[in-house]
Amino acid sequence: MEKKLVIIEDWCKGCGICVEFCPVRVLEIKDGKVRLIDEDRCIKCGLCEMRCPDFAIYLEVKKDVEGVNAGK
């Protein structure tokens, strides 16, 4: 399954906790909101999601449509 990092800007208060816990430093605070700097370098570890007190950042799981349909 493929994962994608999703940021809900309206919920982000810019506290920077997610930025501090990111092991590959692909997040930054810009204009008071978290921003993904380099999506290709994101390892989708989920540390940002686990630490965000406002649930403003999370990993969305994209289901493999071909894999699901192939089983039928």
Image (tube, grey):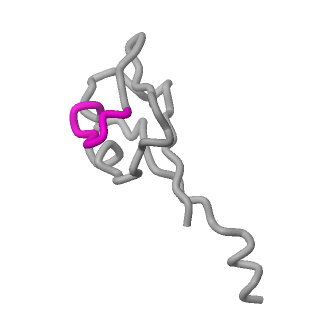
Q: Residue at x 77, y 89 (%)?
A: 72
Q: Quadrant of residue 67?
A: bottom right
The residue at the far front in this view is: 41
Image x and y of residue 45, in percent:
34, 53
Question: What residue is at 42 percent from the left and 44 percent from the top?
Answer: 42
Apparent side of residue 20 relative to residue 63 in the rendered image (left or right): left
Viewer-proximal residue, 11 or 39? 39
In magenta segment, residue 67: no
The residue positioned 37% from the left and 30% from the top of the image is 27
Q: Which secondary structure dominates the residues rendered in magenta?
A: loop
Query: Is 48 in front, or is 13?
Result: 48
- In the rendered image, the residue lying farthest to the top is 31
Residue 21, percent from left and from top? 23, 39
Total label count? 0
Q: Residue at x 40, y 25 (%)?
A: 34
Is residue 25 on the magenta stretch?
Answer: yes
Span colored in magenta: 19-26
Of residues 9 and 69, the one drawn nearer to the viewer in this rendering: 69
Res. 19 image quadrant: top left
Q: Is residue 68 left or right of residue 52?
A: right
Image coordinates for residue 55, horizontal then vertical, percent: 39, 40
What percent of the width, then of the height, locates residue 26? 37, 34
Q: Is residue 71 left or right of residue 45?
A: right
